[in-house]
Image (cartoon, rainbow, N blue to C red):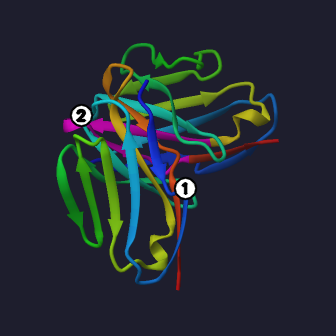
Amino acid sequence: SAVISQKPSRDICQRGTSLTIQCQVDSQVTMMFWYRQQPGQSLTLIATANQGSEATYESGFVIDKFPISRPNLTFSTLTVSNMSPEDSSIYLCSVLVPRYEQYFGPGTRLTVT
Amino acid sequence: KNEVEQSPQNLTAQEGEFITINCSYSVGISALHWLQQHPGGGIVSLFMLSSGKKKHGRLIATINIQEKHSSLHITASHPRDSAVYICADNNSGGSNYKLTFGKGTLLTVNP
């Protein structure tokens, strides 16, 4: 198993600003993911955070808007840049452990005004 | 394209009732996950299964690979079970670690 923490747990931000969300895992994991859940919607994968190299983004998500860092095997950050009200969502990180089990963080609830 | 459908979308029950939430998927999978999302947004993994049945406390998950269908059962439901239950499967887009999510079932258990 894996225990994941995220910071901040929630934030209210102004349009045009940026927010960096941190994800910390209690053990080394190879694969870490960032998801977005817009109000009333299911989760959508933003990107796979790769340690030591650039993240792999899903269709519809770009590095300029959602830069991701993964400096080591237990930590990653997601930045939501130049925010607009449409970015108001819950952002979750998750990790993949052997045999395809995924564990999720507690989420960051972002409101953009 | 893989699709994951859940039913019902909303479910209200009285404490003590037996609950069933259904999940259907459209393509072959390597595993199916049941997740629980609390009002604050955090997600807890309940089960991952690729065949048969798993049980944890009052929760039971079953899967029928041939019919591409899974169910989550809650016995003796309790108000603290109130949450959104999400099923998700592996094997979307050719990468079997990526998950395709259902839209979730909002369960409310009244005392």
The residue that label 1 is drawn on is B9
Residue A56's image quarter?
A: top left
Instruction: Say left or right for B25 vs A80.
Output: left
Q: What number of labels is visible?
A: 2
* Residue B90 to residue B45: above or below: above
How many other residues sit within 10 Å of disc 1, few (<14), some (14-19) or many (≥20)? some
The residue that label 2 is drawn on is B30
- Give the image location of residue A112, x and y in percent: 77, 40
At numbered mark 1, what does the secondary structure look like: helix, strand or loop?
loop
The answer to which of A31 and A73 lies nearer the viewer is: A31
Callout 1 amino acid: Gln
Residue that sits furthest to the front in the current view? B67
Tell me the chief SS of the magenta region.
strand
Estimate the spatial distance between the alpha carbons at disc 1 and disc 2, rounded to whole Å.
Answer: 25 Å
Tell me the magenta residue range. Answer: A90-107
In the image, what residue occupies the spot 40% across and 39% down?
Answer: A94
Instruction: Please report contact status of discs 1 and 2: CB closer than 8 Å, yes or no.
Output: no
In the image, what residue occupies the spot 78% across and 36% down?
Answer: A85
